[in-house]
Amino acid sequence: MNRRQALLSLGSLAGAGALALKNAGNAHAHSPNNFYQGTLPYDFTSLEGFLSAESVQSHYANHHRPHVDGANHFIEEIAKARSAENWALIPELSRDLSRHINGHNLHVVYWQSMAPHGGGDPTGDVAHHIETHFGSPEGFRRQFRAEARALRGNGWVLLVWEPVSARLLVTSVEGNTDAMLHNAAPILALDLFEHAYYPDYGHRRDDYIDKFFDVLNWDFAAVQLKRNHH
Ligand SMILES: [Fe+2]
């Protein structure tokens, strides 16, 4: 599967409301009601220069995968608690489920937000929206960078489409649990958990943030925008 096909198949899931990579080579059985981890649309080595193959592989297997397993686990646990009428357990299970679903969905957007030949400036509709809402691609980059540098601790910085105001916004999320803008659709995501940058950058977190723009996948932003902007 080439990158274009991967993007198109991801776009085809728009109606399902679930962000998941749909790959023909996925060896894990799944049902429409469960979360699963698709394979990345590029090799682990493809982002070298920004991220090492080792760190991408470890991130994918040791930090993204547990969210997929966790989401499926807590769906089952909630069903068990419901069957047993053990309602006191529900609120905490529900929070755990949300945390894992957010963790999974945001990683899916993060992987797609990078491409081996990414970078540069957006074109077409994305360029139009970036210029309308941020003044210029450089205005967007500087705002996104400022948001990322200011985020304390683990979390995410996102470019989102806010449907009520019909605007692109830059926003950040602390951890996986804090509320995101409701109904806002992630267009691009940067993982700022320590596990994302520490293996390659150590304490040079700002370098990781700056170099993200060199691999930024504007093609994916275009697909996401088209899915969410009606
Ligand atoms: Fe991560």
Image: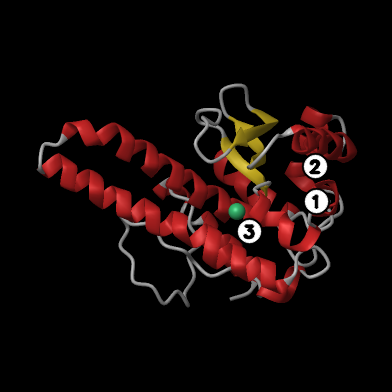
Amino acid type, mark 1: His
State which mark lies toward you, 1 or 3. 1
Pointer 3 residue = 111
Residue 174 falls left or right of residue 210:
left
Callout 1 crowding tier (Cα within 10 Å): few <14, some 14–19, many ≥20: few
Secondary structure category for the residue under label 2: helix
The residue at the point 31 percent across, 54 percent down is 73
- Residues at marks 2 and 1 touching, judged by CB atoms closer than 8 Å: no
Residue 146 falls left or right of residue 40:
right
- Residues at marks 2 and 3 touching, judged by CB atoms closer than 8 Å: no
Is 3 above or below relative to 166? below
Extreme-top residue of the structure: 165
Secondary structure category for the residue under label 1: loop
The residue at the point 84 percent across, 54 percent down is 211
In the rendered image, the quadrant that contains the C terminus is top right
Q: Earlier in the sequence, mark 2 or mark 3?
A: 3
Foreground pick, 167 / 34: 34
Question: Residue 50: which numbered mark, if any?
Answer: none
Give how far across and how far down residue 164 sits, in percent.
56, 23
Give how far across and how far down residue 206 sits, in percent.
84, 46
Pointer 2 residue = 127
- Residues at marks 1 and 3 touching, judged by CB atoms closer than 8 Å: no
Amino acid type, mark 3: Trp
The residue at the point 30 percent across, 32 percent down is 91
Question: Residue 203: which numbered mark, if any?
Answer: 1
Q: How many marks?
A: 3
Foreground pick, 173 / 131: 173
